[in-house]
Image (cartoon, grey):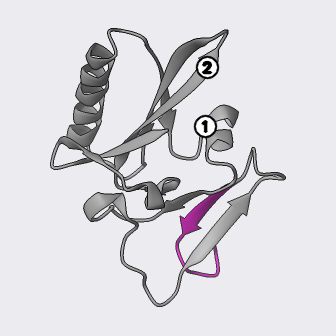
């Protein structure tokens, strides 16, 4: 697996330490590589956070086109919006998908930690679990 995020309208690699830690203000590319009948297959997910900008979304699509050209058109693509992740997308992170509020910093790490944070965890096993940061107030 390889993960990139859009920063300053450019594709930037995410450090493997931060794979599965996404931010609602960013867009991400997740390239999943697997073997099927002895052939290498590619699946490229384009993940869009709810707080991402129109410009970031355009840069996300351009980056996906660049990656597809690099792989000679062999990428199958799936568009994913925050909160509507398909089961396979959740499964590749093995229960460690966490979506933070705000924007990613350098190398794609999560935003600075505030004093109080609240998370909503949803799922029944590692293949369908996601964790999302929600506003730290009683109504959440």
Closest to the camera, between mark 2 and mark 1, is 2
Callout 1: SS: helix
Identify the mark nearer the N-term, 2 or 1: 2
In the displayed structure, 78 sits above or below 99; it is above
At x 30%, y 59%, the residue is 107
Left or right: residue 73 versus residue 56 is right
Which mark, by number, is residue 3? none
View extreme (right): residue: 124
Callout 2: SS: strand
Residue 132: in magenta span: yes
View extreme (left): residue: 8
Please tell me in which quadrant of the rendered image residue 97 appears.
Answer: bottom right
View extreme (bottom): residue: 115
In the displayed structure, 126 sits above or below 109; it is above
The residue beneath circle 2 is 35
Which mark, by number, is residue 89? 1
Left or right: residue 139 versus residue 31 is right
Residue 46 on image: x %, y %: 42, 33
Q: Which residues are magenta?
A: 130-140
Q: Residues within 10 Å of mark 1 (few under 14, many from 20)?
A: some
Please tell me in which quadrant of the rendered image residue 128 appears.
Answer: top right
Q: Residues within 10 Å of mark 2 (few under 14, many from 20)?
A: few
Residue 111 on image: x %, y %: 37, 71
Q: Indicate the quadrant containing the C terminus: top left, top right, bottom left or bottom right.
A: bottom right
At x 82%, y 51%, the residue is 125
At x 35%, y 55%, the residue is 25
In the displayed structure, 58 sits above or below 53; it is above
């Amino acid at each position: 697996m390889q993960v990139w995020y859009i920063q300053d309208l450019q594709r930037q690699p995410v450090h493997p330490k931060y794979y599965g830690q996404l931010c609602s203000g960013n867009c991400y590319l997740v390239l999943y590589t697997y073997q099927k009948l002895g052939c290498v297959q590619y699946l490229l997910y384009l993940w869009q956070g709810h707080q991402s900008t129109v410009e970031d979304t355009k840069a996300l699509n351009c980056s996906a086109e660049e990656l597809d050209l690099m792989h000679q058109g062999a990428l199958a693509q799936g568009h994913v919006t925050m909160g509507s992740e398909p089961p396979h997308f959740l499964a590749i992170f093995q229960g460690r998908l966490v979506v933070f509020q705000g924007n990613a910093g350098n190398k794609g790490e999560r935003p600075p930690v505030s004093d109080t944070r609240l998370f909503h965890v949803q799922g029944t096993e590692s293949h369908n679990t996601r964790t999302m940061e929600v506003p730290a107030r009683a109504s959440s």
